[in-house]
């Protein structure tokens, strides 16, 4: 599969699956993975979580996160997934929240809530991760031992 086809396949996956798994780290170094409903625009990933959720607390301490998107409903043995190294933060400005809510709600086809519902003192917040490095793997089947090749891709804006 050529690079353009891999990129298209990755974008299609990101625009189709409802969940991404967010990997964060607790202050004592313990890994913490959390599946969240998400939406994406270009290199930006958005989701809503409670401020007191463990992954939200982790992001406040360490903005470096890792995202993995995959389709768990297929029997595809290729191991196709999209991996994203990113920095995340809580959105605190009304204009940023309004943009994120438009992206999230367009994907979910819900009425657009007021951004004020995600500002202090509300417990539910909106988060944004900005991708630094994005890749997918290509599975090779040589010498009867399958192995993965990491292929970096650029998400279109």
Image (spheres, rainbow, N blue to C red):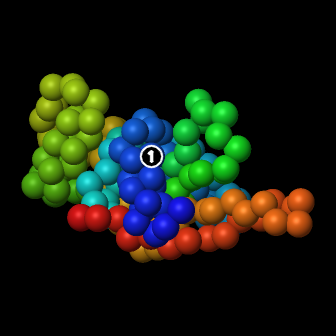
Residue 111 rendering spot, x and y as whole percentages: 15, 26
> From the viewer's perspective, is 157 left or right of 142?
left
Viewer-proximal residue, 46 or 149? 149
Say which quadrant the C terminus sits in. Answer: bottom left
Tell which residue pokes out farthest to the right in this image. 144
Q: Which residue is mark 1?
A: 13
Q: Quadrant of residue 90?
A: bottom left
Image coords of residue 101 (percent x, y):
20, 42
Tell me where residue 113 appears, x and y as whole percent.
16, 32
Residue at position x 62%, y 70% in the image: 150
Locate residue 117, reporting x and y percent: 20, 36
Q: Residue at x 49, y 45 (%)?
A: 20
Count of numbered tags? 1
Mark 1: give few (<14), some (14-19) or many (20+) Cα within 10 Å. some
- Is there any visible trace of residue 43 in the rendered image? yes
Horizontal side of residue 97 vs 55, given as left or right: left
The image quarter containing residue 26 is: bottom right
Q: Assign a secondary structure to mark 1.
A: helix
Q: Nearer the viewer, residue 74 or 63?
A: 74
Q: Is residue 62 visible?
A: no
Q: Is residue 135 above or below residue 20?
A: below
Identify the residue at horizontal 39%, vertical 56% (top origin). 8
> Viewer-proximal residue, 77 or 100?
77
Side (left or right) of 144 relative to 131: right
Q: Nearer the viewer, residue 149 or 90?
A: 149
Residue at (60%, 51%) from the top-left corner? 80
């Amino acid at each position: 599969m050529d690079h353009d086809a891999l990129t298209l396949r990755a974008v299609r996956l990101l625009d189709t699956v409802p969940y991404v798994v967010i990997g964060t780290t607790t202050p004592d170094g313990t890994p913490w993975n959390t599946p969240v409903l998400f939406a994406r625009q270009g290199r930006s990933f958005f989701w809503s979580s409670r401020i007191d959720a463990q992954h939200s607390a982790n992001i406040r301490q360490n903005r470096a996160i890792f995202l993995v998107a995959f389709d768990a409903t297929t029997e595809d043995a290729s191991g196709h997934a999209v991996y994203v190294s990113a920095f995340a933060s809580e959105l605190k400005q009304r204009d940023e929240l309004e943009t994120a809510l438009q992206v999230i709600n367009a994907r979910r086809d819900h009425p657009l809530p007021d951004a004020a519902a995600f500002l202090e003192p509300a417990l539910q917040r909106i988060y944004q991760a900005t991708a630094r490095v994005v890749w997918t793997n290509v599975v090779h089947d040589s010498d009867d031992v399958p192995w993965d090749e990491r292929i970096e891709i650029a998400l279109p804006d």
